[in-house]
Image (cartoon, grey):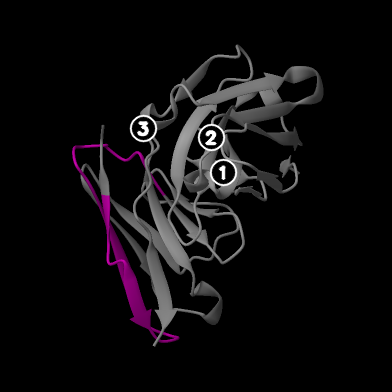
């Protein structure tokens, strides 16, 4: 079965960087884009960008250009999202999701990133 | 960038009620719209894709309709498990609606 398993919760200081991993299984990793979505406490869903695991190509939402980097390691079918220059308003749950043709059809369990001094 | 406006933001209803949530796009997105359900502390779950296609395993009381700029998610007879937050997503630029919290009346 399709699974996306994310790394554990992180606590970071303002100005630091964080990297979240998304280990996939149960499907051909390079056949589907991996998207990243975040959700601040009590707020809605915010799309951050995608990576094409086949080519390594990326596309980021304008808000995150310059602060987010998405990468992948096809040998271990894992996608990564790194967010730099963290601020307190980056505190959120970060999700990876498999991008199907018409929707995000499978999601990781989420990773809480807390930014606090 | 295509905006999506979801309404209402909160909806109070009772078990057995029929409820409808609306999502409007700022320009035509054909049928590139998905609906998700999210429960507290959990990842979103896909309900409907391509505006009206029911995801495998999702109960048939959920249905979606619409095309162009106006879309609806309907739950025909609310069950206790349906009280959650619902999001639409336009699949051109992946932007989500603001969400609708479905509460027990």
Whether discs 2 and 3 lie on one chain: the answer is: no
Along the viewing direction, whichever of A101 and A11 lies nearer the viewer: A11
Residue that carries the numbered disc 1 in the rendered image: A105
Above or below: residue B86 compared with residue A73: below
The residue that label 2 is drawn on is A100
> Observer-nearest residue: B84 or A41?
A41
Tag 1's secondary structure? strand
Residue A63's spot in the image, x, y percent? 38, 32
Query: Which mark, residue B93?
Result: 3
In this rendering, the answer to whether B56 lies above or below A23 is below
Q: Are marks 2 and 1 in contact (CB under 8 Å)?
A: yes
Chain for numbered disc 3:
B
Q: Residue at x 45, y 78 (%)?
A: B78
User: Residue under mark 2: which chain is it in?
Assistant: A
Residue B96 visible in the shown view: yes
Left or right, A107 with respect to A65, comes to right
Marker disc for residue B73: none
Q: Where are the magenta residues, as a range? A: B5-34
Query: Quarter holding the C terminus of chain B?
Result: bottom left
Residue at (45%, 65%) from the top-left corner? B85
Q: Are marks 2 and 3 in contact (CB under 8 Å)?
A: no
Residue B103 location in percent, x, y?
42, 79
Query: Tag 3, which secondary structure?
Result: loop
Magenta span includes B92: no
């Amino acid at each position: 079965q399709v699974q996306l398993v994310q790394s554990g919760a992180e606590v970071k200081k303002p100005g630091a960087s964080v990297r979240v991993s998304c280990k996939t299984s149960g499907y051909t990793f390079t056949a589907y884009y991996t998207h990243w979505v975040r959700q601040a406490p009590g707020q809605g869903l915010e799309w951050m960008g995608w990576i094409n695991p086949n080519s390594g190509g990326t596309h980021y939402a304008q808000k995150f250009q310059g602060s987010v980097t998405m990468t992948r390691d096809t040998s271990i079918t894992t996608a990564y999202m790194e967010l730099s220059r963290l601020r307190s308003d980056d505190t959120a749950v970060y999700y990876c999701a498999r991008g199907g043709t018409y929707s995000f059809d499978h999601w990781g369990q989420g990773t809480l990133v807390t930014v606090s001094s | 960038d295509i905006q999506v406006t979801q309404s209402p933001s909160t909806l109070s209803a009772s078990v057995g009620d029929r409820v409808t949530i609306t999502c409007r796009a700022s320009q035509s997105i054909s049928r590139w719209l998905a609906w998700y359900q999210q429960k507290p502390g959990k990842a979103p779950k896909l309900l409907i894709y391509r505006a009206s296609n029911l995801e495998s395993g999702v109960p048939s009381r959920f249905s979606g309709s619409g095309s162009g700029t106006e879309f609806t998610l309907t739950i025909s007879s609310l069950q206790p498990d349906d009280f959650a937050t619902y999001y639409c997503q336009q699949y051109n630029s992946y932007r989500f609606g603001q969400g609708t919290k479905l509460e027990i009346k």
